Image (spheres, rainbow, N blue to C red):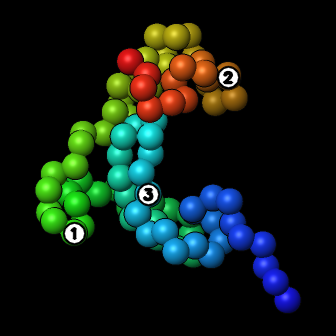
Amino acid sequence: MAFPVAESPLLGSTDKRIYWSPVFDEYGLICQPSAEILQIHHCPFCGSRLSESRRDKWFEKLEKEGWKIWGDPIPIELLSHDWK
């Protein structure tokens, strides 16, 4: 029996172990079989400090745009890596 390949790196069988969020510019280790990500701050290969997460700034910007609750539409410009 063949199983479909998972689209998401967080679900199903995948060889990916490191996740990068382009919106938040943060890295994490994928903890399978759950959909959890353990955020990391240093490269697991060379030990270099990774970029600072932009998560808090993203949510601040989202609130300034008028976003109030989960389910409200998120402005399209905040869904890519190059938001400012």
In the image, 79 versus 62, the foreground residue is 79
Secondary element type, mark 2: loop
Which quadrant of the figure has residue 35? Answer: bottom right
Secondary element type, mark 1: loop
N-term mark: 2 or 3: 3
Q: Tell me residue 53's x, y (percent).
A: 31, 39
Taking the image as shown, residue 76 lies to the left or right of residue 64, namely: right
Which quadrant of the figure has residue 84? Answer: top left
Whether residue 68 is visible to the viewer of this picture, yes or no, is no
Label 3 and label 1: CA atoms lie apart by 14 Å
Q: Which of marks 1 and 2 is in front?
A: 1
N-term mark: 3 or 1: 3
Q: Tell me residue 83's x, y (percent).
A: 43, 22
Crowding at dot 2, Cα within 10 Å, few <14 / some 14-19 / many 20+, comes out as few
Residue appearing at x 42%, y 51% in the figure: 20
Residue appearing at x 67%, y 22% in the figure: 73
- Which residue corresponds to mark 1? 45
Q: Residue furthest bottom?
A: 1
Q: Tell me residue 7's x, y (percent).
A: 68, 59
Taking the image as shown, residue 63 lies to the left or right of residue 73, namely: left
Q: Are the two marked residues, 2 and 3, in contact with CB atoms closer than 8 angstroms?
A: no
- Amino acid marked by disc 2: Asp
Mark on residue 19?
Answer: 3
- Which residue corresponds to mark 2? 72
